[in-house]
Every structure is written in structure tokens, then in C-alpha cells.
Amino acid sequence: MEIINRKAKYNYFIEDRYVAGIELKGTEIKSLRKNSCDLSDAFVIIKNSEAFLLNAYIAKYDEGNQFNHEERRTRRLLLHKSEIRKILIASQKDGYTLVPLRIFLVNGKAKVEIGICRGKKTYDKRETIKKRDLEREIRRRY
């Protein structure tokens, strides 16, 4: 099971990657196992030496009861202090942001891959589209 943020590669240059655990409530992990998640508008912030995942959509669990979770709640990320320090320093550079790239499961535990990213300009996006179309054309011919 893996949920990928497809917009991230299109909108950003990914400079560095980190893997973090996610602090989830009971029904959230069940929804993740059913691939009911969207990372397209999500981002990561660091506040008071803690990392948080904001605006990530995890759908309510269908068989859940009154203890179901909110879809877009703020979720804490589990990282070592040294990693948080490195990420904070890298993200404070001008034009850099923290974007979740994918969510995946390892031994039943949810992990998120965070990318330290720099935003692309419009001409960079056009170049990305051009490269992708060329690769697709080459694959068709061979």
C-alpha cells in the first residue's frame, strides 16, 4: 500500500528526503489500509521543535462509529530532534518548503516521506511536460 503525491514532482524540485512516522488515531490507520488518502494539498510545518502534517486528507472509516476521526486534522510526525533540526535549517532557506511525497506502511506502521522542495517556475513545468511527452513517445516506438 502506497499513496503518492503526484503534484509534488510536477510543482517542486525535490532536494532531500526524510522518512517519518505519523501519529494516528484508531480509525485512521484502517482508512489508510483502504487507500482512502489524498496528499495533494498537504504540507509540513515545524513548530516548537515538533513536525506536523497539515491538510492531509484521510477519509472517515466506513465501519467506524462515533469515535471516527476528522478528515483534515493536524497530525504529529515522529522524528528525532537532530532530524527536525536539519529539516528546519534546510526549509528556512529562501524558496524552500516541506512537502509530503508519499505515505506507505512498514510492518503495519504508517510512514510519510517528506521532501525538502524548491518551487518550480512556469517554464520549468513546461520543460517537465516536454520531457515526459518525449519519454512516452520513445516508449511507444520501441
Image: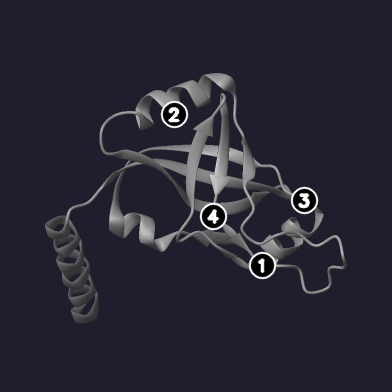
N-terminal-most mark, 4 or 2? 4
Quarter of the N terminus within the rendering: bottom right
* As drawn, 107 above or below 127: above
Badge 3 is on which residue?
A: 25
- Nearer the N terminus, badge 2 or badge 1? 1
Compared with 34, 76 (above or below) is above
Dot 3 amino acid type: Lys
At horizontal 38% and vertical 23% (from top left) the residue drawn is 89
Which residue position is annotated with label 2? 87
How far apart are the two marked residues, 2 and 1, measured between alpha carbons?
Answer: 28 Å
Tell me if residue 129 comes above or below residue 80 in the rendering: below
73 relative to 141 in the view: left or right: right
Task: Between residue 135 and residue 68, name the one nearer to us.
Answer: 68
| Mark 4 lies on residue | 55
Q: Position of residue 83 (x, y in %)?
A: 51, 25
Between the C-alphas of marks 3 and 1, the distance is 12 Å
Mark 4 or mark 2: which is in front? Answer: 4
Q: Which residue is mark 1?
A: 59
Residue at (84, 68) in percent of width and height: 64
Q: Residues within 10 Å of mark 4 (few under 14, many from 20)?
A: some
Gap between marks 3 and 4 measured at Cα: 16 Å
Query: Residue 61, percent across and down?
Result: 76, 68
Give the amino acid at mark 1. Answer: Ala
Q: Are marks 2 and 3 in contact (CB under 8 Å)?
A: no
